[in-house]
Image (cartoon, rainbow, N blue to C red):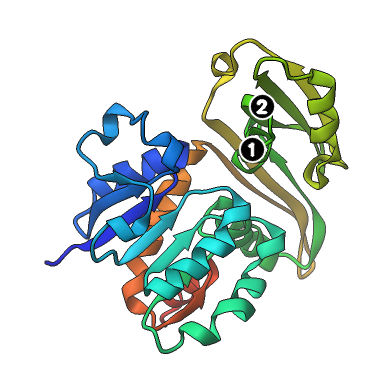
Amino acid sequence: MLLKKVCIIGWGNISRYVKYSIDNSNEFELAGVVRRKKSLDNIDLELSTVKVVDNIDKLDDIDIAVLCVPEKNIEILTEELIDKGISCINCSDDEKISYKYMYNRFNEQIQNKNINIFHGFGFNNGIKDIIKNTIDFMTDTGISYENIGPGIDMKYTSIVRNINGVKNALVFVEPLSMFKHSIKIYIELNENVDFIDIRKHILSEIEFRYENVDIELVEDVRKYFSMNMKYNYTKAGASSRAFNQNMNFNMNVNMAGLTANILVNGMKEMKKYSGGVYNIKHIFLNKYSKY
């Protein structure tokens, strides 16, 4: 069987697990990893047998690109890949680039190009929505709530790490009570950077404006690293006139590994779709609704 040639754009926690999933697959070949030019001088040992470049044009005949980059780069990279005729998949959960936005932005122009954009193939705004919708579908009324964490929020972590002056950061989300969560941020700063200025910058970001945020300056962020993430969705309600319908979904996972597996399984489904923009709900409707 001819293997699909895949490249990973960006290199971080999710990217590593995407590489592991591709290595374990019998459908894909990892043709290369695209990184920022300044990162090419410091190549991880696990990439020693992989072609690492600063531009996808330096890789040959790529079929699919996996976007493991900050949310702000998703749209522009998607547009560049469309121009090159390369399908792509991402795990974005940014409301600014929702599925509806990406569909309106790109669907018409790729109809005849035989390429796909698979948008939002992650847990948030992906698998999580399917879990919640399934439970809600079984009840007419009731109260529902979700607890997220404690665990690293990869989206928020990326936002803080990209602030000028921040050397490294980890952002944890922790449940406070029903419907409410707090954010704990550990940051490590470059020399001669003022902590107060960075703190003001973080709190001014829209993503953190309405959260209970605690920011702690530390010498080494890596001491706090953990890929464990807990998630719970609970609903207590009624189905028809049957009360006491108590439903619960609970998991404790390595979120980077989980996300990578979702991405690679999403790539496996691409061959079933004609050119267009799709989200994870399309996959479930097509794959699990054949009666």
Residue 132 at x, y percent in the picture: 65, 58
* Residue 166 tag number: 2
Q: Which residue is mark 1?
A: 162
Picture quarter with the C terminus: bottom left
User: Which residue is more in the foreground, 215 or 286?
Assistant: 215
| 248 in relation to 265, above or below | above
Q: Label 2: few (<14), some or many (≥20) within 10 Å?
A: some
User: Nearest the camera: 136 or 246?
Assistant: 136
* SS class, disc 1: loop
State if disc 1 and disc 2 touch (CB < 8 Å): yes
Question: What x and y, as percent, mark residue 175?
Answer: 75, 33
Q: Could you tell me which secondary element the residue under label 2 belongs to? A: strand
Q: Amino acid at mark 1?
A: Asn
**Which three-letter amino acid code belongs to the residue tagged 2?**
Val
Q: Residue at x 42, y 65 (%)?
A: 88
> In the image, 34: left or right of 253?
left
The residues tagged by marks 2 and 1 sit, at their Cα atoms, a distance apart of: 7 Å
Give me the disc on residue 278: none
Q: Looking at the figure, which quarter contains the N terminus?
A: bottom left
What residue do we see at 65% from left, 60% from top?
Answer: 135
* Residue 103 located left or right of residue 145: left
Q: Position of residue 97 (x, y in %)?
A: 66, 64
Residue at (41% x, 80% y) in the render: 290
51 sits to left or right of 97? left
Q: Which residue is the extreme one toward the top? A: 219
Is 98 above or below relative to 70? below
